[in-house]
Amino acid sequence: MNVDVLVTNIGELLPMDKKGPVKGKAMNDLDVSTDAAIAIKDGHVTWVGTAEDAKDIEAEQTIDAHHKLVTPGLVEPHTHLVFGGSREKEMALKQQGVDYLDILAQGGGILSTVRMTRAETFKELYEKAEFHLDRMAMHGMTTVEAKSGYGLDRETEMKQLEVVRELNNNHPVDLVSTFLGAHAIPPEYKHNTDAFLDEMADMFPEIKEKGLAEFVDIFTETGVFTVNQSRTFLQKAKDAGFRVKLHADEIDPLGGTELAVEIGAASGDHLAVASERGIAQLAQSDTIGVILPGTSFYLGKTSYAPARQMIDAGAAIALSTDFNPGSCVTENLQLIMSIAALKLKLSPAEIWHAVTVNAAHAIDRGEQAGAIAVGRPADIVIWDAPNHMYIPYHYGVNHAHTVIKNGRVLYERQALR
Ligand code: NIG
Ligand code: FE
């Protein structure tokens, strides 16, 4: 056999090659192969076997994994990748105990990022998003969802979606685009929320026609959009041909988890304060719970999403950074894996399902991303770790040694000189 790349001497390989989404107890069943090897041709995985059998394979390039851990590229199912400016000045307010939603109600928070995003050019937004995306790639993320939502007007929302499209065309990491025009209420519509939602919904046909987004999302929260408004808006999005998602039950328990299930959302995201009923319904549904525990950490919450209860009830869970300038400012999904272990009490096996196969299903990439299998794009990470338990255990740093996207080495850790 003649191949382009051979990754061999893999200590532990997690192929994650299952029909997903993986629900409930099954999230704890991890297939682990040892002394493995992977062959890649034309950007795709063509063979997976033992390092012993790999000795007969002729490869243009051989990568010795030195008995380290090898997994699929991480899939990041929820980010606010494109935004102007930054909000480090809000940190002092948070330290004084000013609540996230109060900052927003006073015209800060998301709305201050909206002002900065409206003020930046396409090029400025593009270069900033590219910088963050590069950093995600260096942390092993090879497929990333990206939302708009800092424009809250036609022009700027379009500018954000076009940045995502251009970046997806130029950057090796695959982007999946979501229209989050309903992210907050802009000052010009403060007293006319329904009219604002109508204006955002009026954009659906153009976004669809130009192929600028696959998903539509809404922030269902106190002081933002109600469950009823969200239902109407998301139904219009479905009618226009979009798949839908929700920022649901992040801060106040409004019943967003129930709405996510009722409307057939691909995912309900956050679910930090989901009700018992919501959890039971989620477990019975095809909707994936995308849990963002970095947000609870960053906003100083004392309790975290009931992810343990969700899995025990039989739900499928994915994990995400929620990368954004306000509620979780990190591109490092590995850090979130640690928080999931420490605060959500998830096992390493559950965590690996949540950042690969289930995360891929949450953004309709279940057939392309999140697994190492013959015929799939070769999105692979070699980690500076002896086994899969090590990544959540050793927290706050980047463990990615080599990141391969579509069969090509995208990032390789440099030695200190
Ligand atoms: O997912 N909750 C709403 N949106 C983001 C935060 C956005 C921001 O603060 O800029 C979130 O937490
Ligand atoms: Fe978010």
Image (spheres, rainbow, N blue to C red):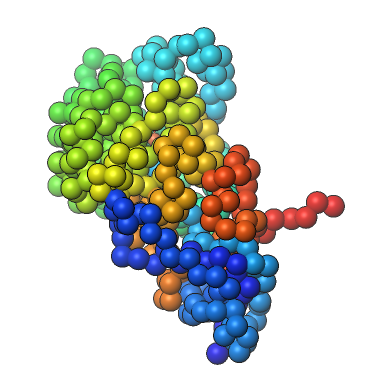
Classify residue 129 as left or right of residue 165. right
Q: Position of residue 302 (x, y in %)?
A: 43, 22
Classify residue 113 as left or right of residue 310. right
Mark count: 0
**80 and 309: which is toward the camera:** 309
**205 and 238: which is toward the camera:** 238
* Residue under the image location 20 percent in, 29 percent down: 255
Q: Position of residue 67 (x, y in %)?
A: 64, 67
- Identify the image quadrant of residue 180: top left
Q: Residue furthest top?
A: 96
Q: Is residue 241 visible?
A: yes
**130 and 415: which is toward the camera:** 415
* Residue under the image location 25 percent in, 44 percent down: 313
Q: Is residue 83 visible?
A: no
Classify residue 256 as left or right of residue 291. left
Q: Position of residue 249 (x, y in %)?
A: 28, 29
Q: Position of residue 244 (x, y in %)?
A: 25, 45
* Rendered view: 143 above or below 221: below
* Rendered view: 166 above or below 233: below
**357 and 77: which is toward the camera:** 357
* Residue under the image location 35 percent in, 54 percent down: 27
Classify residue 311 as left or right of residue 413. left
* Residue under the image location 62 percent in, 59 percent down: 386
* Rendered view: 84 above or below 70: above
Q: Residue furthest right?
A: 417
- Tell me the quadrant of the picture where the N terminus can be found: bottom right
